[in-house]
Amino acid sequence: MAKWKWATLALAVMILLAGCSSNNSNSESSAPSGEAPTASASASPAASPSEEAKPVTIVYEAWTPYKEDMDKIVAEYKKIHPEITVEVRLHANYSEYLTAIKTSFASGDAPDLFAFDSPTSLANLKDQIEPIDEWASKAWGDAWKDKFIASTLTDVSLDGKTMGIPMHISPGGLIWYNKTALDKYGIGEPKTYEELKKASDTLRKNGMQPLLLGAKDSWIVIDTFQTILNDVAPGKQYDAYAKKIPFTDPDIVKAFDLWKKMFDDKIFQDDAFSMTEYMDVYNAFIDKQSGAFESNGAWNLDIYANADLKAKVEAVEWGVMPFPDLNGDGKVPPTLSTVGGYALGKDSENKEAAFDFLKFMTTEKGLQIMMDHFLATPPTKEGVELTVTLSPNAKQNRDTIGQIVAQTEPVHRGIDNAKVADKMYEVLTKVAYGQLSGADAAAAVQKVIDSEG
Amino acid sequence: MRNRQYSAYLYIAPIMAFFIVFLLYPLLYTLRISLFDWNGIDKTMKYIGLDNYNEMFKDPVFWQSMRNFAIFAILVVGIQMVLGFLLAYVMRRPNRLFTAYKTMIFIPVILTPVVVSYVFTNLLAYNDGLINESLRSIGLGSLAFSWMGNPHIALYTIVGVTVWMGTGFSMSVYVSSLTSLSNEVIEASRIDGATKWQTMTRVVWPMLRDAHYSLTIIGAISALKIFDIIYLLTRGGPVHSTEMPSTYMFNKAFGTYEQGFASATATVIIVFAMAITIIQLRVSRNSSS
């Protein structure tokens, strides 16, 4: 009998523990949205952190920027605000970051500042984000939005609230190429599907792989397919996600069929699904130079800042282009607008210091440091003059990206719903392996869209 | 008498506290979460009863992960045991060369999966991996497979890598078991006219029953839990051909933000692991008796 008493007591303690923990997590309240941050401990945007000079530690968690840049940013910030310590948790890549950030929130170890890079992650992290509108107004005045390029703010906004300071402009859905190799085999920049196919055949005959795609990573597969979709069925995917038209629309099915054809025609490299974009494909393209084309975004400009591969990068002339006109209508598909931003943690106890650092990092000295490495266009209207000297090839490609963006206005990148995105990657894999027809693939995605309220 | 009874509970209190906090509580918490629709981040959780389990049992990918686990476990446990036993038996006599060989065979056991995956990613790369390049260079290009990109081969590639990583452990277990085996029995079998093969298979192998059971249980549970090497080499693909319950669960938790669903998968894995252990222990006890 005593045994049962002890067992019951132990169970009761355990249940109490469980109850307490769930009560704690549920009872935490945050400032109502739209309400001005209170003047408590650290949540007042009015006072500057240096006025109080109280030692504060803030945590920044992300996969970007590069560690050396982040170290520089933190060091520069420390010169102005010695009382603020910035603890940096940088992850090797975006996938690892997503796993880590989710664990951080679940374990109550949420960072004060963190990044998001897709509509999927923004949608799932939204309840952990403090909209920055109030803080930005305090920092830059009521007309603060004029400081940023409008489209960048649209990308980081949700339900009328600005969920973060936008990252630099760096469109996805481009093709990079090794111009030196193409010249060697007499291949010009392919403008149509047929030219791309012909270029692939020539490259294969000469022992080179054609278009490299790190298909083990779902994000680049979805980036690439969204670009194909935007060529074959302009705008239709977005209407389908919004349930305005079915995803089984004949044009969307055509895009799946074209995706299959690209594998059948051996336009992508052999064994694409066993390679990650970073670092397998990146290394194959830049280091080993075993492939002549690479599906990647404008952020690939960072090859010019890669000290490890400097010699190899400089020895080759690189080029960048939009995807060719795949359906023969004479138009190239638009690029994909990256939906990236730096967010302020809703439960941060140091919002004031955190936002001050964010401001420094994304619009002041920190922006300069990052742009010098990314070589990208800043999200601010003011622009940033690079302090690094660009090689003629780097400058040319940076200008080309600017021209591509100017000619074809970027469209929405990514899929907001994680389940739809997951299904999309699954069916694209199956279509590529010939296990699913284009029509069945579209129907499978439609089924998930339907099941999501 | 009653005081003595209470003091006994006092003595077991530390381990009970450890058990409750680090084992029982997480298990029950996982079970609880499996009844909710929750993305693992937000504070709001919606109670949905057994819906996660219903959805999971209807998902063909879940069943494929279980099939993959079965194939993987049978092959890995079987091959590792046989190879480990053969290596231990062949090198049972004290010999410096054998000691060096055994050390080399054991080295993969201490390597982290990250290192192993890095090595094998480079070795097995289709276009410029060492294995395929070697095959092509000796005119066996037709055998240069897509080791991790072919859905019909990828699982067996993972089996091969896991066997390479784990055979040293099986061998070391058999080495220690063989050390405690009486030489008289082996000599007696020889005197009775048994061949070397018969001695090994009908005398020595049956006498190592405890080692077989330990390795089977450890191997089966390890196979059920395996995650790192698969995630690093194939991420469960292509087309779920190397999907395991653990990678399936991971994708639900961190890919599609379905923490409740992932917890339901975790619960099934736990129940399955317990069932395997109980069955194997029962079989072991029955055989012993």
Image (cartoon, helix red, strand yellow):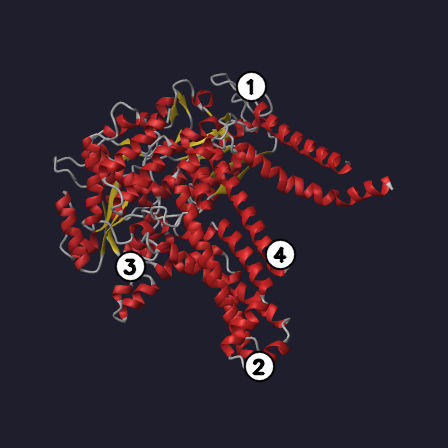
Q: Earlier in the sequence, mark 4 or mark 3?
A: 3
The local secondary structure at tag 3 comes to: loop
The local secondary structure at tag 4 comes to: helix
The local secondary structure at tag 1 comes to: loop
Question: Which amino acid type is marked by label 1?
Answer: Thr
Question: Which amino acid type is marked by label 2?
Answer: Asp
Q: Are marks 1 and 4 on the same chain?
A: no
Residue A167 shows which numbered tag? none
Q: Nearer the viewer, mark 1 or mark 4?
A: 4
Nearer to me, A334 or B104 = B104
The local secondary structure at tag 2 comes to: loop
x then y, percent, for residue B5: 82, 42
- Asked whether residue A45 is in view, the answer is yes
Report how far apart the C-alphas of labels 1 and 4 lie in the structure.
67 Å
Could you tell me which chain the residue with mark 4 belongs to?
Answer: B
Residue A38 shows which numbered tag? 1
Query: Local crowd at mark 1 within 10 Å, few (<14), some, or many (≥20)?
Result: few
x then y, percent, for residue A304: 32, 49
Nearer to me, B147 or A402 = B147
Could you tell me which chain the residue with mark 1 belongs to?
Answer: A
Could you tell me which chain the residue with mark 3 belongs to?
Answer: B
Quickly name the residue at label 2: B192
Q: Nearer the viewer, mark 4 or mark 3?
A: 4
Instruction: Indicate the quadrant where residue A399 lies.
Output: top left
Quickly name the residue at label 4: B285
Q: Which residue is rendered at x = 41% and y = 40% of the image?
A: A369
Residue B127 shows which numbered tag? 3
Q: Nearer the viewer, mark 2 or mark 4?
A: 2
Query: Local crowd at mark 3 within 10 Å, few (<14), some, or many (≥20)?
Result: some
Instruction: Indicate the quadrant where residue A426 lies.
Output: top left
Quadrant in which the C terminus of chain B appears: bottom right
